[in-house]
Image (cartoon, rainbow, N blue to C red):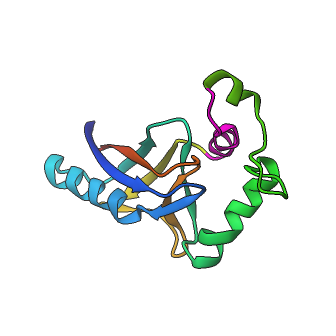
């Protein structure tokens, strides 16, 4: 079984900024297939850092700019109605303001695995692979892609 690894860097936007990384997943699969003459297998993407996640969603403005953030804010709001940052015990440990970010990232996942067949990732027409920044500041994030196949 062949294994191909690649890392790509992204500049993310705070508070649930999202980047469609579907083409990057497919590119890593295509590179692995070309290099190792493989056709079928899986690709895993893993984002480094404790407050970002990877998921699939329909990458359209409503969910990207509003709906997902509002849904996750129900479980882990950043600010109260007056605009004050809500206190999380995490803030006591590190003297920062991103406790809500860690909870959002935990509800998501830092990795996603997708099968590929004949060199093409097997996602549906409305599924986009998406990097989500949960932190309270813009960040630089890496995704480590690892392709395994035969």
Q: Position of residue 1 (x, y in %)?
A: 27, 36
Residue lying at 69% horizontally and 28% vertically, measured from the top left: 90
Q: Is residue 50 magenta?
A: no
Give the percent coordinates (x, y) of residue 36.
17, 46
- What residue appears at the point 54 percent right and 55 percent down from the top-left corner? 14
For the record, the magenta segment spans: 95-108
Give the residue at x 54% y 35%: 50
Query: What kind of secondary structure does the magenta stretch mostly adopt?
Result: helix
**Percent position (x, y) of residue 60?**
57, 77
Judging depth in this view, the residue of 132 and 37 nearest the camera is 132
Classify residue 12 by image quadrant.
Answer: bottom left
Q: Could you say which is closer to the camera, residue 8 or residue 76?
A: 76
Q: Is residue 73 above or below residue 62?
A: above
- Up the image or down, 95 lies above or below 81; here it is above
Q: Is residue 99 magenta?
A: yes
Examine the rendering and report whether any part of residue 25 can be seen.
yes
């Amino acid at each position: 079984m062949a294994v191909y690894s690649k890392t790509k860097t992204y500049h993310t936007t705070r508070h649930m900024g999202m980047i469609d990384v579907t083409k990057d997943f497919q590119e890593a699969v295509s590179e692995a297939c070309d290099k190792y003459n493989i056709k079928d297998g899986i690709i895993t993407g893993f984002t480094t850092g404790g407050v970002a996640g990877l998921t699939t969603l329909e990458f359209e403005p409503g969910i990207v700019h509003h709906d997902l953030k509002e849904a996750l804010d129900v479980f882990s709001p950043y600010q109260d109605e007056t605009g004050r940052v809500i206190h999380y015990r995490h803030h006591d440990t590190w003297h920062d303001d991103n406790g809500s970010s860690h909870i959002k990232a935990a509800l998501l996942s830092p990795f996603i695995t997708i099968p590929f067949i004949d060199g093409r990732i097997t996602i549906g027409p409305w599924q986009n692979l998406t990097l989500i920044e949960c932190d309270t500041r813009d960040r630089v994030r890496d995704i480590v892609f690892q392709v395994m196949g035969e």
